[in-house]
Image (spheres, grey):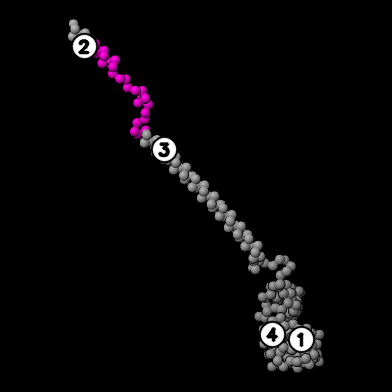
Amino acid sequence: MAALTKAVYDSALTEDDEPAEPSVARLLPGGTTVAALIIVVILIAAVGVWRHAAVREHSQALAQSSSEREESEAEAVATGPSPSAPAPAGERTDDVVVYVSGAVASPGVLTLPASSRVIDAIMAAGGATPEADLESINLARLLVDGEQIRVGVVGESPPAVSEAGTPAGTCIRLATATEAELQTLPGIGPALAQRIISYRSKHPRLSTVEELDEVPGIGPSLIEKIRPGVC
């Protein structure tokens, strides 16, 4: 009986004295959960750093673009308009105005580019008529502003020559006259005609008779003789 009582007593003492498992221990996460949390935190931090870097790079790009645009505008103001910019309407100087008459479809005053030639003027006037004598015209000659291009007909007699040596009622344009036409002026022979053409090749805008004083062999007295026959 004593042994049974002691066994019951020892059993009760063991159950009462055994410390209870703390409840806090059940609330602590395991190792796997902690690792997962660490990974999530690292990912969040990485995304934040990436977004911050992207925003910063975008801001720098905008600032650089704005700076380059301001520098470009400042340079444009400093240098002025581009030399290749087209001239405003009404200020163009690369055109010539010529009068085409004679055996062409539509005679009249025409405005053409300065690089145009006699053939271009004739075509702009509707082209030559079937009876036109194109052999007597230098179709490849460059046009000169203000000149007249007269297309004769085949078999037409040349205009009568006046006492001054020029066709009656006409005059010679120094800027466009051929060697033969220059020789119709009084005192101008083949040598002087060639000198005038040579001088004109260096001074394509030759237009006044006074400029011939620069040609060797032509002086004031000869200039006065040929003045009536020069346009």
**Badge 3: residue crowd in 10 Å (few <14, some 14–19, many ≥20):** few
Q: Amino acid at mark 4?
A: Arg
Residue at the image point whose x is 65% and y is 62% from the top: 77
Q: Amino acid at mark 3?
A: Val
What's drawn in magenta, residue-wise? 6-33
Expressed as whole percent of the image width and height from the top left, the position of residue 95 reads 71, 73
The answer to which of marks 4 and 3 sits earlier in the sequence is: 3
Of tags 1 and 2, the one toward the viewer is 2
Measured in 3D between alpha carbons, the distance from the residue under mark 1 to the one under mark 2, in whole angstroms, is 153 Å
- Helix or strand or loop: what does disc 2 sit on? helix
Q: Label 2, on which residue? A: 7
Residue at the image point whose x is 51% and y is 48% from the top: 56
The answer to which of marks 1 and 3 sits earlier in the sequence is: 3
Q: Is residue 143 above or below residue 12?
A: below
The answer to which of marks 2 and 3 sits earlier in the sequence is: 2
Q: Label 4, on which residue? A: 200
Expressed as whole percent of the image width and height from the top left, the position of residue 221 reads 78, 93
Q: Label 3, on which residue? A: 40
Q: Amino acid at mark 1?
A: Glu
Measured in 3D between alpha carbons, the distance from the residue under mark 4 to the one under mark 3, in whole angstroms, is 91 Å
